[in-house]
Image: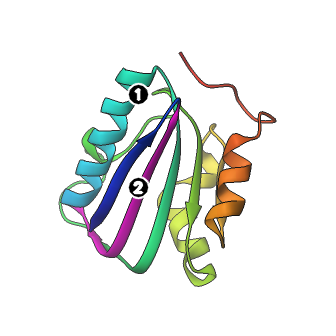
Amino acid sequence: MVVNKSFEPPHLVVAALAGVVTTSDQRELVGWVRESIERAGGVRLLVTLGQFHGWQPSGSYDDPALWLRDDEGVSKIAIVGEAAWRRTVLTVIGQPLRRIPIDYFDTEAAARRWLSSESENALSS
């Protein structure tokens, strides 16, 4: 479930997920990120997984409301969670195939440092 969503100006969107994430949760999160992109012109995304237990998908994986495209204005995605979920989470979001930088971290502090670095793509506008 989506536990919390916040926008930290100028370009950081932060979402906390917990428990089992459903298709409805994923649709809510993607819609909110898209709204944030419209307001900010481009964002970096930080997702924290607390007490995470995986996904319970229903419906079609090709539903565009469930996935962000690489060209939608997200310049980086950082995910924070237990090390045991790293491979599964990165596989589900297609990390090896995406053009935008995506990384997985053990701590929020490390994720925030990476997100604030300018060594990767600049924010889309």
The percent position of residue 106, horizontal first and vertical second, equals 66, 73
Most foreground residue, 14 or 101: 14
Can residue 20 be found in the magenta stretch? yes
Query: Residue sitting at 30 percent across and 46 percent down?
Result: 62
Residue 80 vertical position relative to residue 53 in the rendered view, above or below: above
Res 18 quadrant in image: bottom left
Q: Main secondary structure of the magenta part?
A: strand
For the residue carrying disc 2, how many other residues have a C-alpha within 10 Å: few (<14), some (14-19), or many (20+)? some
Outermost top residue: 125
Residue 54 vertical position relative to residue 63 in the rendered view, above or below: below
Query: Residue sitting at 68 percent across and 25 percent down?
Result: 122
The answer to whether residue 28 is left or right of residue 105 is left
Label 2 element class: strand
Tell me the kind of residue under disc 1.
Ile
Most foreground residue, 34 or 113: 113
- The residue carrying mark 2 is 15
Residue 92 vertical position relative to residue 52 in the rendered view, above or below: above
Label 1 element class: helix
Tell me the kind of residue under disc 2.
Ala
The percent position of residue 11, horizontal first and vertical second, equals 52, 32
- The residue carrying mark 1 is 37
Segment colored magenta? 11-23
Query: Residue sitting at 36 percent across and 22 percent down?
Result: 38
Number of the label disc, if any, that sits on residue 52:
none
